[in-house]
Amino acid sequence: MTDKWEWQAVGHIEQQVSDFVGKVQTAGKRLTDFSRSVTERESEILQGVKQLSGLLDKHVHLAEEESGSMKKLLGDSLSHYRNLLQAWARLVEERMEGKEFINQFEKSVILAVFGTVNAGKSTMGNFIAGVPFAESPVQAPAPVPAFYVYDFSESDKDRGERPLAENRFKENIVQETSTIQYFTLENGLTWVDTPGIHSLDQEYEDLAKKYVNYADLILFVVSSSSPGKADEIAELERLTQKEKQLLVAITKSDLIESDVVDGKEVKRVVPKSIHDRQAQEQYVDGLIRSKGIDRNLKDRKFISLSSRLAKLALMEQDEERFRQSGYPALYEQIGGVLTEHALELKTDRPRREMNALIHEMMDGYEWNGKRIDGIRDIGKSFQGISEEIQQKVELLRRMHTDLFQEVRMNKEARIESELTSLGYRFDGGEAIGSEQITKVMEKELLEELNRLIPIKLGKVLADFEHVQLSSLPLFIDASFVGTYREFAYTEYKTSETTRDPRGIIERFQSFFLDKKFTELKVREMKKTKQMRTGNNLSAVMEQVFDQVEQQLEPFVKAIMEELIETYFYEQRNALNEVQQALKQFADKLQTLTYQKGEVRDEQLIHSH
């Protein structure tokens, strides 16, 4: 064993202790900042979960729609995941509320002291807290912290944690096995004085184990008068099973020497000899090795302590005697725990727990044999619904061509009949123009569209309710006109003209009686004439069907788009909001994840 008593005191007693307290203060600040970062991250997670839950609750009314509809499918999913997120919020809240006990262990390095009764644990704890300094001329390096006790012996009503009235550990008494006492020095070191686990009833043992589970270091205290008793080694063996780092201190390592000064007997406290101290340290070391439990020793130097020497040294301000008491070595040894690496180890568990919580929220987990979905699962579920809606939308969009063609086909004969009727009216002398033709077309097409739309869409959308169309933006540019045919004919024209007398008689009559003679002359003329044969019904039909083709198809397409928008608006709006919020929360969880070795300082915490 190395002779730790070769260690040399440096500076005054105050400086020796102040160096230790400074390390505690630094550790306390680092761990307080880290604990704040954990709390802030938990708060951000809780806020994100509640916001998501509230958003799903906003749209969950969709579940009230008829069974089998897309709204019902989406609404049921919203309801299911709303309940899941509400359960998550409760878990995070319980985690935060339940951390009151744990927080005191996260915000400081926990040193749990174990040992047998009258091993000097209480006196040692008072020294670390600075109690003897307040009672001596030596200036105390820090205010004496508040002492607390958790008493199991009280009634259920009074049982629990309370301040120690004396604000110090009681010394030189038989310690009760139903109490755990502790103080926290400068927010950096929590010193827990606890009885051995084996001495507690099952009810008390559970809480005592919590202190051990959260302890960063176990200080095992044995008395110099009888080091390494069987029950002590058994206790040490139990502790090493928890893979806790160990320090071993041997207390009461002093003697009372008598001397004669000026003829009078004088007694004084002196440290045990180096030989005796080494012998007892080697003995304890051998016992530990024989049990195979030396693997967790943080430091193989076993500190031999004398509280009596230390108290005298403080009263007399004797630096050498204080060094001989072993307390400077103990300060140095414990201070070595408060290193950068040790603080990273200290923050490792809460970082891993935070990352595990985030991982469970992101990827889900198993609970009671059931799969609990995470954010990614929820996102995939809603993405699946979104894709299913999109498939229906595309199906409806493609349907507009079939719908248009079926309307045209179903009404073709009826349109021809109506146009023929209009032709008859025109032939009867009624003026039939574009306005009359458009009205007839609008009536027939509207009637068929209103009949077919609920039939067609109802096959795809179980709860579709069609609002009857009242008008069509249709204008047919066509008019009825008469049809004519040109006929050729011959026209004969007769005229009476004078002529010369013919024969003797006519000449006699003409000469003596002055009689005039005439004759009929026929003139033949070739002429043409336009005859009305009917109307332009065929041309009107062709124009009507061409214009219906051009105008009706885009109108039906627009109708389908409007119906799609109306029917799926709530679903799409809800999905867009939910999916965007899920992505934002997933991104936020990624930023809240602790990276390897990350322990953010105060500046980083507040910039976050």
Image (cartoon, rainbow, N blue to C red):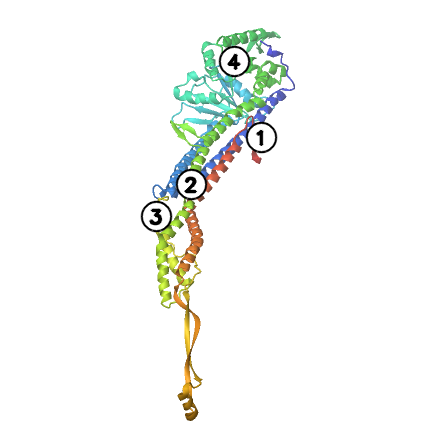
Task: Estimate the x, y position of residue 342 in percent, counting from the top left.
Answer: 56, 22
Image height check: is 484 above or below 31?
Answer: below
Q: Return the mark for residue 601.
A: 1
Mark yes or no: residue 169 visible.
Answer: no
Q: Label 3 to label 2, Cα distance in Å? A: 19 Å
Would you say 123 lies left or right of 402 here? right
Which badge, 4 or 2, comes first in the chain's sequence?
4
Task: Estimate the x, y position of residue 537 in percent, counting from the top left.
Answer: 39, 61
Return the residue nearer the eye: 109 or 261: 109
Which badge, 1 or 4, comes first in the chain's sequence?
4
Task: Estimate the x, y position of residue 73 in percent, counting from the top left.
Answer: 38, 40
- The amino acid pointed to by label 1 is Asp
Classify 10 Å Cα crowding around label 2: few (below 14), some (14-19), many (20 and above). few
Return the residue nearer the eye: 604 or 273: 604
Residue matched to label 4 = 295
Return the residue nearer the eye: 576 or 79: 576
Of all residues, the one furthest to the front in this rendering is 504
Which badge, 3 or 1, comes first in the chain's sequence?
3
Residue matched to label 3 = 455
Q: Circle 3 sits in a helix, a strand or a loop, which is it?
A: helix
Q: Circle 1 sits in a helix, a strand or a loop, which is it?
A: loop
Residue matched to label 2 = 391
Q: Circle 4 sits in a helix, a strand or a loop, which is it?
A: helix
Q: Label 4 to label 2, Cα distance in Å? A: 64 Å
- The amino acid pointed to by label 4 is Arg
Task: Name the residue: 53% across, 33% down.
Answer: 591
Q: Label 1 to label 4, Cα distance in Å? A: 33 Å
Which badge, 3 or 2, comes first in the chain's sequence?
2
Of all residues, the one furthest to the bottom in this rendering is 512
Q: Label 3 to label 1, Cα distance in Å? A: 67 Å
Marks 3 and 2 close (CB-CB < 8 Å): no
